Amino acid sequence: MTAQVLDSAGVTAAAEPSKIRRPHGPVQWPPRRNLFGVEVSITTCNEASKLIVEAAKRGCGGATTFLAVHGIVTGVTDKSYGAKVNAMDIVGPDGQPVRWALNLLYRAGMRQRVYGPEVTLHICRRAAIEGVGVYLYGSTHDVLVNMRSRLECLFPALRVVGIESPPFRPLTEAEMQKAAQRIIDSGAGIVFVGLGVPRQELFAAEMRRRINAVLVCVGAAFDFHAGNKRTAPAWMQNHGLEWLYRLVSEPRRLWRRYLVTNSIFVFLLLVNYLKPNRG
């Protein structure tokens, strides 16, 4: 068993560092469709997880994210953030309204959303089979410990080679370099990033230049898989009402987000649907 160490930054990582992998050829990422200026992938949980693990095995790196309405609207209203999202290899439709919009505007034929917490489990299952190490970056140390324990219980062969809870602020250049080196030294092929929108995508956009691991932004998946928060009932998820469940759970924190972003999303969808010669 590989020993683990805890450094002064509160990072648990593999004690035996390995060299950064070298690329062995690119992966063919899924096609994209322009949703109000954000390029969203037409894919599935199975396909996305397969491609992410394949990219990790080849060592060609990448950056992926899974966005609900809030993330899409943030990409529309914040051009700098939107450009970083559009440079990613997969931008999965995490929310049902995003999937519905793609089907309505492009007849995409998507039968299911590509839900970040679900993709996380798909990736971990494949990574365990393929022997690809994963690294958990984000949230608090307690959440990371619980998430690691649950993932290893679900997938006994899974190698969680490092966990790291960063400071709740943008990293300095020196801190970013040290974080990159810790990830490289851990031998991780996949880095799950749980910092929330937009921090996680900004981090992934910066980090992908420094490492050959695949960065996977999964937001609230950390809290869900750690048992820190409960997911919405299946019927609410299927009917696009997960936002309402979360709003009721955390009204003071989330009411403004959903009031503003949901309204903007509906407006943009109507404008684009009624646009002549759309498609």
Image: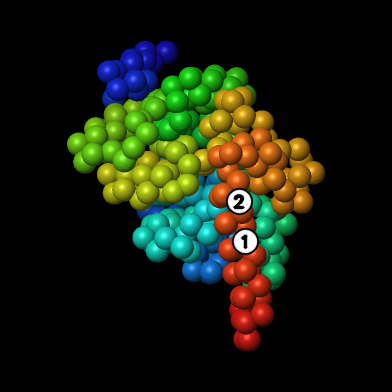
Give the image location of residue 131, x and y in percent.
48, 30
* Residue at 68% from the left image edge and 54% from the top image edge: 96
* Residue at 55% from the left image edge and 39% from the top image edge: 253
Give the image location of residue 26, x and y in percent.
40, 55
* Residue at 76% from the left image edge and 44% from the top image edge: 236
| Residue at numbered disc 2 | 258
| Residue at numbered disc 1 | 263
Q: Is residue 88 left or right of residue 125?
A: left
Q: Residue furthest left?
A: 174
Residue 195's place in the image compared with 228, above or below, is below
Precedes in sequence: disc 2 or disc 1: 2
Disc 2 secondary structure class: helix
Residue type at mark 2 is: Tyr
Q: Residue furthest right?
A: 235
Residue 271's place in the image compared with 85, above or below, is below
Residue 129's place in the image compared with 30, above or below, is above
Disc 1 secondary structure class: helix
Looking at the picture, tell me which residue is in the foreground, 72 or 114: 72
* Residue at 72% from the left image edge and 57% from the top image edge: 111
Residue type at mark 1 is: Ser
Distance of mark 2 from mark 1, alpha carbons? 8 Å
Q: How many marks?
A: 2
Q: Can you see residue 52?
A: yes
Residue 15's place in the image compared with 164, above or below, is above
Mark 1 closeness class: few <14, some 14–19, many ≥20 residues within 10 Å: some
